[in-house]
Image: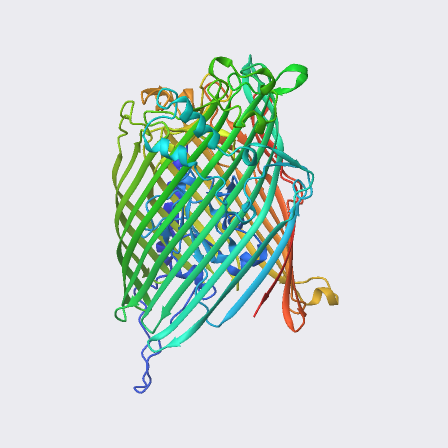
């Protein structure tokens, strides 16, 4: 990045702010020009008022900020099944891990997600931001991404804020039904490893098989660690024998996985009541799908001037994902008042099985690991939103919400085998180990806010709105993890038993004081549980006014007072009291301003500047070790993290040359103090742990281009005549630079918060974690109203990005998303007197693979696997 980047950004913003005033000054008439006076007394003077911006869409006219919007029509055309995948079609957005949205190259911690304006909790242990794959597109009426900050939004803002709008009460009654099925070339009909689980797993609910055993619950209630010395041999034997065995431990092979299936029902209507109109809407959405990943996992070791492979594993993972979603809403409207009550329930369950075999560098031998797990994620949200016209000029807007997420992981199983006699696998419960983990996470968010809008006029058709309001937020989280192993005292497990099948190995007969003894290996002194809290009180004021003809200014100031705390919890009555973690207490004044110059009927120029912040997430602060099954990587928090402060500059040109068609081009720059970056800690083994640090400083600069056009077919012929063609494209170029000079320091958990040279972890001038230089989307298709058909090709490209900082002396982890080509087709037809709609979706036509690697004079594949091509067909109708 050039040394003049900051000056370029300041020039960019100030030019956008000054240009309209200069233009108005240039258009002013000479002072000596006098108005012409007519000699007809009866003639009324006629004042000609020039109205510009009439071709700017209402959604863009209403906002003074830089915003990207996806309507319900856009969602139908792309055919994306969740908010996460739909947002990848928006300029400058990319998807990480299939769940988290990166805006303008900044990680999910810099982008907040709101549901109807209210914040949501997250069921993810590693995130405070809710994963957007939880939200099916069927419940959404609109998605918007605001990329410039305004005072009425929360101060945690870096890349942008995503606001999900749910479907609301309808103007006319309807009932819509849809069903779909599909598969994937890597999964459907293919070989896979699975485990039985419980009888009701297909529906996403456990039938009680995985419930925490009674004797174990009673032992935990004593506050003692479940080990010898705290419990008798007989007590440990009975507790160990209570653990579920074959249904969860025994990995099975299947030659053919079933197809995916989903259905959706949504309906609603409105009623005239004495005081106004009452509307109701309900939705139920269910899906059951499979995903298989067959890939390679490696770790690296330095070998002179190059990287060499240390661990080298092949693995096969199968996941059965079941989701059940429901929405119920009530709305009341009358002339001057409206109230909307929205209730949302989302449940997502993953049944995961993995087998991994390969060379283990730390032990110098080939090993096999089998894992099984059941991951329940559940979200419930209830919201009240309303507005009232108190007078012709004064409007009250208010909202209140409560949301809770839960993550329950019972019986997360893992067993490792070594190669023994005649090349057979063995498990001795000593040199190679087994684990059974139980964990829970609960996250609750209460929030409320209100604002008063006062409309005023400056004359000459220039209007404005003065807004003042407040927001409050209380976010509480608690999480715990209990870990158990069957260990053998003094290596007394008989050799023949070591070679038996796992359900025989862990049978009641072998769980005894002289063979296998259940031992709790949960960390003490606050290493396995924590409680977190974030409390924010905010007040804001802003004005949105046309200060001079055709020039609109939206400026505001937000005050936020916040306290964020993490408290480690000792699960055992014995042991030391955990070291207190100093809470983060901060107060901020956050100014923002955006100027819009509507210099033509169909064109406008925006420029903005703002100050915002980013807060560390709970899991980034909590000093507990956690295994993420998605990345198969250990994570540990850093309690010494601090808030990030961001200064944002934006400018964008917009040309709406026809209805629903536009060209936009923009520039942006961000100056970031203490950005949070993921790094790999050296733990003495090849595996390492991923943790977090505050880098000293970073800058980010970029440009965006967005185009959408519709046109009649240039080709003659009956098939072409009725089609309206669509071309849409967007591109974002981003460059970033992390600063780590000599004398700069970071504070790590591994070094107990003592200052450590930043250059040990960060290469000066390297890119921000998660930032891709190029992000592009192209859509090409048609819409035929006569034939009731619609087809679209969708191409998405995301260039390589840093997924994590390498441990000291090692290069960064690089992820290469590449290009994804999708095709969607919709066709309406009549059958049995009812109009039906057929849908076809084909995903990843190019066969793009998932690639994450380290590279220095040689490449080490951290995680590589085939994604495969997916095909689905659907049928829907509406009454």
Q: Residue, x 45% and y 65% (percent of image)?
A: 281
Height in image: 294 above or below 539? above
Q: Residue, x 36% and y 32% (percent of image)?
A: 220
Relative image position of residue 401 (x, y in whole percent): 33, 54
Q: Residue furthest right?
A: 717
Relative image position of residue 678 (x, y in whole percent): 43, 30
Q: Quadrant of residue 612?
A: top left
Can residue 48 be seen at all in this image of the molecule? no
Q: Quadrant of residue 544?
A: bottom left
Name the colouring of the figure.
rainbow
**Residue 841 versus residue 606: which sits nearer the camera?**
841
**Residue 731 versus residue 755: which sits nearer the camera?**
755
Height in image: 282 above or below 365? below
Is residue 872 shown left or right of residue 668?
right
Say which quadrant the C terminus sits in: bottom right
Is residue 846 shown left or right of residue 126?
right
Can residue 357 be seen at all in this image of the molecule? yes
Q: Residue, x 42% and y 55% (percent of image)?
A: 344
Q: Quadrant of residue 438?
A: top left
């Amino acid at each position: 990045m050039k040394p003049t980047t900051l000056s370029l950004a300041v020039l960019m913003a100030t030019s956008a702010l000054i240009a309209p005033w200069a233009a108005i000054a240039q258009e002013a008439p000479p002072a000596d020009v006098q108005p012409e006076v007519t000699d007809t007394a009866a003639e009324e003077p006629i004042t000609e008022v020039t109205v510009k911006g009439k071709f700017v869409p209402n959604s863009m006219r209403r906002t003074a900020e830089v915003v990207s919007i996806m309507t319900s029509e856009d969602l139908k055309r792309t055919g994306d099944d969740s908010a996460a995948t739909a947002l990848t079609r928006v300029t400058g957005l990319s998807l990480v891990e299939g769940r988290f949205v990166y805006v303008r190259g900044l990680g999910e911690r810099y982008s907040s997600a709101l549901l109807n304006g209210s914040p949501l909790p997250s069921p993810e242990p590693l995130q405070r931001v809710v994963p957007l794959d939880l939200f099916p597109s069927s419940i959404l009426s609109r998605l918007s991404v605001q990329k410039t900050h305004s005072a009425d939004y929360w101060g945690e803002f870096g890349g942008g804020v995503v606001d999900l709008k749910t479907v609301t009460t309808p103007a006319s009654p309807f009932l819509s039904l849809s069903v779909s099925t599909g598969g994937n070339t890597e999964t459907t009909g293919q070989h896979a490893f699975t485990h039985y689980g419980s009888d009701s797993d297909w529906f996403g609910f456990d039938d009680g098989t995985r419930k925490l055993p009674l004797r174990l619950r009673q032992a935990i209630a004593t506050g003692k660690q479940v080990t010898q010395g705290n419990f008798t041999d007989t007590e440990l034997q009975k507790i160990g024998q209570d653990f579920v065995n074959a249904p969860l431990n025994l990995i099975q092979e299947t030659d053919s996985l079933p197809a995916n299936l989903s259905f959706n029902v949504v309906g609603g209507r409105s009623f005239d009541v004495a005081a106004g109109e009452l509307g109701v809407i309900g939705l139920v959405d269910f899906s059951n799908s499979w995903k298989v990943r067959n890939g390679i996992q490696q770790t690296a070791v330095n070998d002179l001037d190059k990287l060499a492979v240390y661990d080298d594993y092949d693995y096969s993972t199968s996941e059965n994902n079941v989701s059940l979603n429901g929405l119920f809403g009530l709305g009341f409207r009358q002339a001057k008042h409206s109230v909307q009550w929205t209730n949302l329930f989302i449940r997502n369950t993953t049944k995961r099985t993995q087998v991994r075999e390969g060379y283990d560098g730390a032990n110098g031998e080939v090993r096999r690991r089998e894992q099984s797990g059941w991951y329940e994620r559940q979200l419930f949200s209830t919201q009240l939103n309303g507005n009232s016209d108190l007078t012709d000029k004064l409007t009250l807007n208010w909202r209140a919400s409560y949301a809770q997420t839960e993550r329950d992981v019972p019986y997360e199983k893992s067993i490792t085998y070594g190669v023994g006699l005649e090349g057979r696998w063995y498990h001795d419960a000593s040199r190679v180990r087994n684990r059974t983990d139980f964990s829970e996470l609960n996250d609750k968010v209460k929030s409320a806010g209100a604002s008063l809008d006062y409309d005023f006029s400056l004359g000459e058709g220039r209007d404005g709105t003065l807004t003042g309001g407040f927001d409050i937020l209380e976010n509480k989280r608690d999480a715990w993890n209990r870990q158990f192993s069957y260990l053998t005292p003094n290596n007394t497990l008989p050799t023949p038993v070591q070679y038996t099948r796992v359900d025989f190995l862990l049978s009641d007969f072998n769980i005894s004081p002289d063979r296998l003894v259940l031992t709790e290996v949960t960390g003490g002194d606050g290493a396995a549980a924590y409680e977190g809290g974030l409390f924010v009180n905010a007040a804001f004021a802003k004005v949105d006014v046309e200060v001079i003809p055709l020039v609109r200014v939206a400026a505001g100031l937000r005050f936020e007072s916040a306290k964020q705390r993490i408290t480690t919890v000792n699960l055992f009555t014995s042991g030391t009291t955990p070291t207190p973690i100093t809470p983060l207490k901060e107060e901020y004044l956050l100014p923002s301003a955006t100027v819009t110059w509507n210099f033509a009927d169909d064109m406008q120029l925006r420029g903005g500047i703002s100050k915002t912040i980013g807060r560390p997430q709970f899991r980034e602060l909590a000093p507990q070790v956690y295994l993420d099954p998605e990345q198969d990587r250990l994570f540990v928090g850093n309690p010494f993290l601090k808030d990030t402060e961001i200064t944002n500059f934006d400018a964008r040109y917009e040309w709406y040359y026809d209805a629903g068609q536009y060209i936009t081009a923009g520039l942006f720059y961000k100056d970031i103090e203490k950005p949070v970056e993921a790094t790999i800690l050296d733990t003495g083994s090849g595996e390492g742990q991923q943790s977090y640090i505050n880098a000293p400083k970073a800058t980010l600069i970029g440009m965006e281009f967005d185009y959408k056009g519709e046109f009649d077919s240039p080709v003659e012929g009956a098939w072409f005549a009725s089609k309206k063609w669509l071309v849409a494209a967007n591109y974002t170029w981003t460059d970033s630079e992390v600063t780590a000079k000599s004398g700069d320091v970071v504070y790590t958990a591994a070094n107990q918060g003592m200052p450590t040279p930043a250059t040990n972890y960060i290469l000066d001038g390297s890119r921000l974690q998660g930032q891709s230089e190029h992000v592009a989307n192209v859509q090409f298709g048609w819409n035929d109203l006569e034939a009731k058909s619609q087809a679209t090709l969708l191409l998405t490209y995301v260039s390589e990005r840093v997924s994590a900082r390498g441990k000291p002396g090692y290069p960064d982890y690089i992820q290469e998303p590449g290009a994804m080509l999708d095709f969607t087709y919709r066709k309406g037809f009549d059958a049995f007197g009812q109009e039906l709609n057929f849908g076809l979706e084909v995903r990843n036509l190019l066969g793009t693979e998932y690639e994450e690697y380290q590279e220095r004079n040689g490449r080490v594949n951290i995680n590589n696997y085939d994604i495969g091509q997916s095909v689905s067909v659907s049928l829907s109708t509406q009454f």
